[in-house]
Amino acid sequence: MAEEEKIIDIIKKKKKKKGMTSKAKKKNAVANAVIRKGTGTVRINKRNIDSIGPDYVQEFIKEPLELAGETAGEVDIEVTVKGGGFMGQSVASRAAIAKALLDFRRGDEKLKKKFLAYDRMLLVDDARRVEPKKQLGPKARAKKQASKR
């Protein structure tokens, strides 16, 4: 009997918490955000948003939360970011948070216009990617310097 209860407890723990998901990209960084009703906590890769440094990156990520107003205090957001550098990850997580808030408010036009007026990159992913390196040069476009003598 005790073994059956342990198995049931394990199965309950493995169940994913329900919520709305959103995804955003910047260069090689991909962020997935899960939003659900809660107390207003925001976690990025299981770390509280307040423990992220430097400070300007933390403020940058918090922008959509400040624009959303009261809605930000009613929800818990969990972001998972992979790939890229720290700034690419922060841009991707910021966009994922903004998209999640918009999904939670069921596509609220007022909030959408507010996000677009503030910064279009909150809702539109950056399509630019690093161009592959070509032969005869050190980078994608730069070529070997021609010798004059």
Image (cartoon, rainbow, N blue to C red):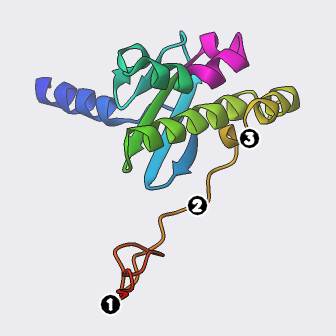
> In the rendered structure, which amino acid carries the disc numbered 3?
Arg
Please, is residue 38 above or below residue 133 in the view? above
Circle 1 packing at 10 Å, graded few (<14), some (14-19), many (20+), is few
**Which stretch appears magenta?**
62-76
Q: CA distance from mark 2 to mark 1?
A: 39 Å
Callout 3 secondary element:
helix
Give whichever of 93, 142 is nearer the camera. Answer: 142
Dot in front, 1 or 3? 1
Q: Earlier in the sequence, mark 2 or mark 1?
A: 2
Residue located at (43% from left, 55% from top): 28
Residue contact between numbered discs 1 and 3, judged by CB atoms under 8 Å: no
Q: Earlier in the sequence, mark 2 or mark 3?
A: 3
Callout 2 secondary element:
loop
Please, is residue 3 above or below residue 147 in the view? above
Q: Residue 66 in magenta?
A: yes
Dot in front, 2 or 1? 1
- In x, y percent, where is residue 14? 31, 35
Residue located at (71% from left, 19% from top): 68
Residue 132 lies in what quarter of the image?
bottom left
- Of the 4 image quadrants, the one containing the C terminus is bottom left
Circle 3 packing at 10 Å, graded few (<14), some (14-19), many (20+), is some
- In x, y percent, where is residue 95? 60, 38
Name the mark on residue 128.
2
Q: Is residue 85 left or right of residue 114?
A: left
On the image, numbered disc 3 is attached to which residue? 120
Name the mark on residue 149.
1
> In the rendered structure, which amino acid carries the disc numbered 1?
Arg
Residue contact between numbered discs 2 and 3, judged by CB atoms under 8 Å: no
Q: Residue 7 in magenta?
A: no
Q: Is residue 73 left or right of residue 110?
A: left
- Of the 4 image quadrants, the one containing the N terminus is top left
Circle 2 packing at 10 Å, graded few (<14), some (14-19), many (20+), is few
